[in-house]
Image (cartoon, grey):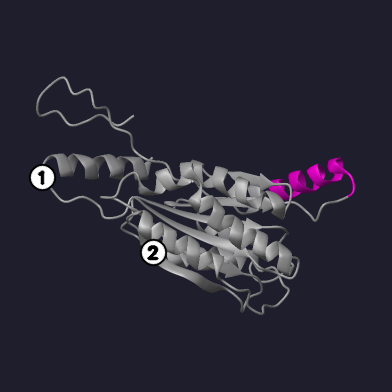
Amino acid sequence: MIWRRAACAAVLALWAGGAVAECRQALALGLDVSGSVDQLEYRLQIDGLAAALGAPSVRQALTVMPGTPVDLLVYEWSGPEDPAVILPWTTIADEAILNGVIAHLQTTERRQTTPGTALGLAMRVGVGFLAQRSYCWKRTLDISGDGKSNLGPRPQDVKAELAGTDVTINALVIGADAPSFGDLRQMDVAELSSYYRHNVIVGEDSFVQTALGFEEYAQSMARKLERELETLIFSEDITQPGVPPVAR
């Protein structure tokens, strides 16, 4: 894949004494704050993201390569007029910065927004943010949502616009408010996951992560971040002097 080839090239350049890329991954997270998300669910989502970023496995993945860190941005989306950045691009260079990001999210309060679900526009907005980080090895947009688009450009049209680009879009699909029967909840998540799979996600390695409800958001986000924050692992078994480590 393009980003892995670029990453390997950057490491080889470093081994040879050349310059190395400053950012291994740009990760933009888009949070759904549409009318279907009430105040309790908003807090479960924003605090869940903070908890996921602080999970040991995610913390390790974010900070394991301080020389080539991850750049992180978080924005909220709802109707066409509502996208807003709640965490501007931040380079996660060390754990102190990550702790600051987590604290910032924990103190973020909900804004007044319109009730619409402009999912296609949210995709375009997120891709626009990623364009500001064109020098990163990999660029990933992560859209969380609990419903289908009902305003603005159709997600499938935006997806078609991005065909052939190096941007990846993943999704975290959130199930409906605790239906009485578990089977109904599973059916709801399965149907919405299919919608996001066909109309939203983009890229060879793109995927849909699910949460049965907002109460599962934190653990589902942590699992998704673990998968997204791929790192290069290099063999320390160098048998020939002057031969660079081998990417696995």
Secondary structure under tag 1 reads: loop
Q: Residue 77: percent from the left, percent from the top?
A: 61, 69
The N terminus: image quadrant: top left
Which of the 4 image quarters holds residue 214?
bottom right
Q: Residue 143: percent from the left, percent from the top?
A: 58, 57
Which of the two residues, 157 or 138, is positioned nearer the viewer here?
A: 138
Q: Marks 2/1: CA distance?
A: 27 Å
Residue 183 part of the magenta-drawn span:
yes
Left or right: 78, with 206 as reference point: right
**Could you tell me which residue is drawn at 63 percent across and 77 percent down?**
111
From the image, tell me which residue sits under label 2: 90
From the image, tell me which residue sits under label 1: 17
Q: Which residues are magenta?
A: 180-194
Q: Decide: is 191 above or below 152.
A: above
Which of the two residues, 186 or 49, is positioned nearer the viewer here?
A: 49
**Could you tell me which residue is drawn at 42 percent across and 41 percent down?**
230
